[in-house]
Structure formats: structure tokens, C-alpha cells
Image (tube, rainbow, N blue to C red):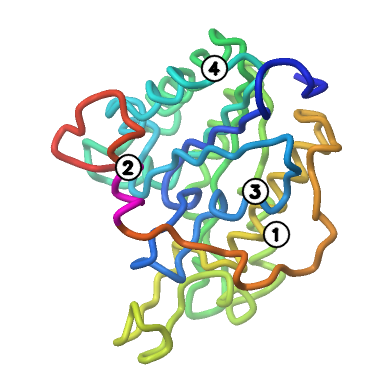
């Protein structure tokens, strides 16, 4: 897996495939942020991050709607493909859902095999857990089977696996119900112009949570020697200037969503 990063034209590229936990959010959704939105904080100039994640996508819809095909058309030998799914796969809608020990690994294999066929490096990244604290302060587990199935596939297919799920559980349990709130969307009325009436969404991150997850994924890539360690920077930096976190204007976001697909949308945009 380890490359010296000196061969080939241009910087090494890390393609990101996933759902809303990874996506680069548009301005109208701020302060929501995916960890892929801030992933570049942790890499030097020899690396380019290509965030192809799409809010609402499962492994099934990302593959079936041409988003994976677009990546595979553009990926070069020596590039990386990080695939992070599970949250939307667990939802009940039939067109979206996959079964953890059924078709979920089948679809993940499309990412793994597609990257390898192009001499690129696949990496599986489990999703983070939501803020699932109940009224008694207990942290329940909402998607446990999907990280387990991803881990099992990583062993079966000999593909690197970054266990963000267990790491997030450890964080959220340590922080407790109040300590974890700054990592997720918990807005009171008038707190943010995009949500005048307030909005509480314990499933989606804000910059603090996105940066924590991105830092861990970058750290794991270096620690596991998946990428050359010198590519990864800023792991010990305690914080980043707020202006470093940017959101795409809605028009650009929509254009990228349309462009980064090689197939029909099928009437839906996930």
C-alpha cells in the first residue's frame, strides 16, 4: 500500500465516497459539515482531496446512480479511494437500504475491486456513531452491524480498514450527553440564520465534530502506513481558524453534484 508519492503526474489524489457524514456541505446547510469538508487540513501540498460524497447516499445508491463510476473513470494509478457508508444503508427505505450481512458488502466490493482494477488503493472507513444519548444519558448503538460487516470485508478482501465507528463511540461516551452536543447540530432559535426557528439534528456534524473525525481518519492513514506518513500534517494542532472551514455556494454545490455522476439520477439525487 505504501507509495513514495513521487511517481505519476501531479499530486496524489484521495477520492472520498460516502454520505452526509463525509460530504462538503453547501452554504444553505451551514453549520452542518462533513469530515471530508475539512480533511484537507491534515495533508500537505503533495495530496489533493477529491470529495465526491453525497448527502443521502448509501453504498447502493452511490454505485447505482453513477457516482462510483465517475470516480473510477477519473482515478489514476497510485490514487486512493476512501469509502465510508453505513448510516443511510441502515434506513428502512427499500431503494436506499442494504442489509449489513447481505448486499452491503456486495456493494462495498464494487469500490474495492474498482479501485484495484485501476491500480489505485481502496480503504474502508466506518461511519461515526450519532449522538444517540437517551434521557438517562446512555449512548445507544444505532448502526453496529454495518461497521462489523465492513470490518469483516476488510479482512476477507485484505483491504485497509479505519474504525472511526468505535473511536467515535469512545469519544461520545467519554464526553457524555452535554459534552458531545458541540460536535452535532444543536441550534436554539435565533442562533444561526439558516435555522431561525432552531434545529436539532443529532445525526449530522458541525465543524468541531467534522475536524475530530477528519483528524482521526488522517492519523489512521499515516499510523497504518496506508499513506506515506510525511503526507499527513497538523495532527497535533489543537484548533483551526474558523475561517478555514468553508461551505460551497449552493450553485457550485449543485453543479458538482450533477457533474460527478456517470449515470442517470433515477429521479433522486442521493
Relative to 188, is 57 above or below? Answer: above
Real-space Cα separation, disc 3 to disc 4, in angstroms: 21 Å
Give the tally of numbered discs: 4
Real-space Cα separation, disc 1 to disc 3, in angstroms: 24 Å
Q: Which residue is mark 1?
A: 170
Residue reaching furthest front? 9
**Callout 3: 10 Å neighbours few (<14), some, many (20+)?**
many
Q: Secondary structure at mark 2?
A: helix
Q: Secondary structure at mark 4?
A: helix
Q: Are marks 1 and 4 in contact (CB under 8 Å)?
A: no
Q: Which residue is mark 4?
A: 115
Residue reaching furthest bottom? 190
Indicate the quadrant containing the N terminus: top left, top right, bottom left or bottom right: top right
Q: Which residue is mark 3?
A: 40
Residue visible at 50% across and 41% down in the picture:
51
Residue visible at 79% across and 38% down in the picture:
231
Q: Are marks 4 and 2 in contact (CB under 8 Å)?
A: no
- Left or right of 181 in this view: 218: right
Observer-side mark, 1 or 4, equals 4
Q: Which residues are magenta?
A: 251-256
Q: Are marks 3 and 4 in contact (CB under 8 Å)?
A: no
- Main SS of the magenta part reads helix
Q: Position of residue 148 (x, y in %)?
A: 57, 36
Observer-side mark, 3 or 4, equals 3
Mark closer to the chain start, 4 or 2: 4
In the image shown, does 101 or 227 lie closer to the viewer? 227
Amino acid at each position: 500500500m505504501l507509495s513514495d508519492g513521487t511517481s505519476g503526474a501531479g499530486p496524489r489524489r484521495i477520492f472520498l465516497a460516502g454520505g452526509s457524514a463525509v460530504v462538503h456541505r453547501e452554504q444553505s446547510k451551514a453549520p452542518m459539515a462533513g469530515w471530508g469538508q475539512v480533511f484537507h487540513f491534515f495533508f500537505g501540498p503533495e495530496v489533493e482531496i477529491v470529495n465526491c460524497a453525497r448527502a443521502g447516499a448509501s453504498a447502493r445508491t452511490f454505485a447505482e446512480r453513477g457516482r462510483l463510476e465517475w470516480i473510477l473513470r477519473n482515478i489514476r494509478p497510485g490514487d486512493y479511494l476512501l469509502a465510508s457508508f453505513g448510516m443511510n444503508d441502515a434506513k428502512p427505505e427499500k431503494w436506499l437500504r442494504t442489509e449489513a450481512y447481505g448486499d452491503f458488502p456486495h456493494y462495498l466490493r464494487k469500490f474495492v475491486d474498482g479501485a484495484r482494477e485501476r491500480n489505485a488503493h481502496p480503504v474502508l472507513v466506518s461511519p461515526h456513531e450519532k449522538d444517540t444519548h437517551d434521557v438517562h444519558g446512555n449512548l445507544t448503538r444505532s448502526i453496529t452491524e454495518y461497521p462489523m460487516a465492513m470490518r469483516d470485508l476488510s479482512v476477507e478482501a485484505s483491504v485497509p480498514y479505519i474504525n472511526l465507528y468505535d473511536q467515535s463511540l469512545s469519544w461520545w461516551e467519554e464526553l457524555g450527553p452535554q459534552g458531545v452536543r458541540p460536535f452535532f447540530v444543536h441550534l436554539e432559535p435565533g442562533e444561526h440564520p439558516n435555522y431561525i426557528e432552531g434545529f436539532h439534528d443529532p445525526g449530522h456534524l458541525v465543524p468541531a465534530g467534522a475536524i475530530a473525525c477528519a483528524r482521526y481518519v488522517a492519523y489512521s492513514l499515516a499510523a497504518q502506513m496506508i499513506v506515506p506518513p510525511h503526507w499527513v500534517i497538523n495532527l497535533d494542532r489543537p484548533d483551526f481558524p474558523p475561517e478555514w472551514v468553508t461551505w460551497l455556494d449552493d450553485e457550485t454545490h449543485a453543479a458538482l453534484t450533477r457533474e460527478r455522476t456517470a449515470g442517470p439520477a433515477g429521479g433522486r439525487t442521493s
